Image: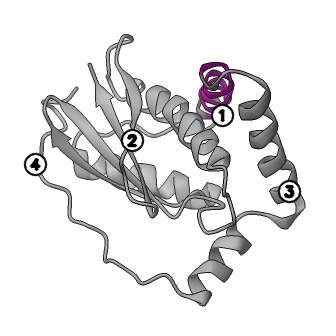
Amino acid sequence: MLKSLSSRTVAPEAAKVADTADLRYLAARQFSAQWRAVMLAMADELFENFSAQEAWGFYRQIGLRVSRSVSLPPVKTLDELEASLNVVLAEMDWGYVSLALADSAIAIRHRAYPGQHLEDASGHWRRAFSALLEGVYTVWLQSQGGRPEMTATHREGASDDVLEFSYGL
């Protein structure tokens, strides 16, 4: 899969945009007020009452289920994969990604995720959504020809405005 998608080696960086009141407003609108308090409370509850591994596994499993109900069309290049992912993510109001090949893996940089600019002092929502995306990206990329043992893995250390993942072995 990685060889067939190797049309480029470096992903263009999304334009860096300053954090403004307007961006915070738009990010809050993206994360439905109807479910915002429930989703934040659920993340807090799971991460505070179960081990981090159990809570992470729960959200990852939710991501696996979500990805099975939202499929990607087959693609042949990394550019096509990125475009396809961004169409689906836009439909879900889940932000956008940039992709690059890195060390026999696909590096995924996810920006503008729901709730990104909301108060999350515990960091539980960021971890919950990262785990969910691990599941989603695992299935979506396996559906593009990835081997069953290949998974998406969240990478710590990213800045506040991006979630980073690696898909490969």
Q: Nearer the viewer, residue 25 or 6?
A: 25
Where in the figure is residue 106, as x and y percent of width and height?
Answer: 25, 37
Whichever of callouts 2 and 4 sits on the residue coming sooner in the sequence is 4
Q: Secondary structure under badge 4?
A: loop
> Circle 3 sits on which residue?
37
Quarter-of-image position of residue 78: top left
User: In the image, is 40 to the left or to the right of 91?
Assistant: right
> Of circles 3 and 4, which is in front?
3
Q: Which residue is mark 4?
A: 9
Element class at badge 3: helix
At label 2, counting other C-alpha atoms closer than 10 Å, the crowd grade (few under 14, some 14-19, many 20 or more) is few
Q: Quadrant of residue 31?
A: bottom right
Q: Residues within 10 Å of mark 3 (few under 14, many from 20)?
A: few
Q: CA distance from mark 2 to mark 3?
A: 25 Å
| Residue bounds of the magenta highlight | 53-66
| Labelled disc at residue 66 | 1
Kindly indicate whether the residue at mark 1 contacts the one at mark 3 (C-beta within 8 angstroms): no
Which three-letter amino acid code belongs to the residue tagged 2? Glu
Name the residue located 32 percent from the left edge and 31 percent from the top edge: 167
Of the residues shown, which amino acid type is indicated by label 4? Thr
Q: Residue furthest toward the top?
A: 149
136 over 98 or under it: above or below? above
Count neighbours of disc 4 (C-alpha within 10 A) and say few if under 14, some if 14 to 19, many if 20 or more: few
Q: In the image shown, does 91 or 156 lie closer to the viewer?
A: 156
Quarter of the image containing the N terminus? top left
**Mark nearer the viewer, 2 or 3:** 2
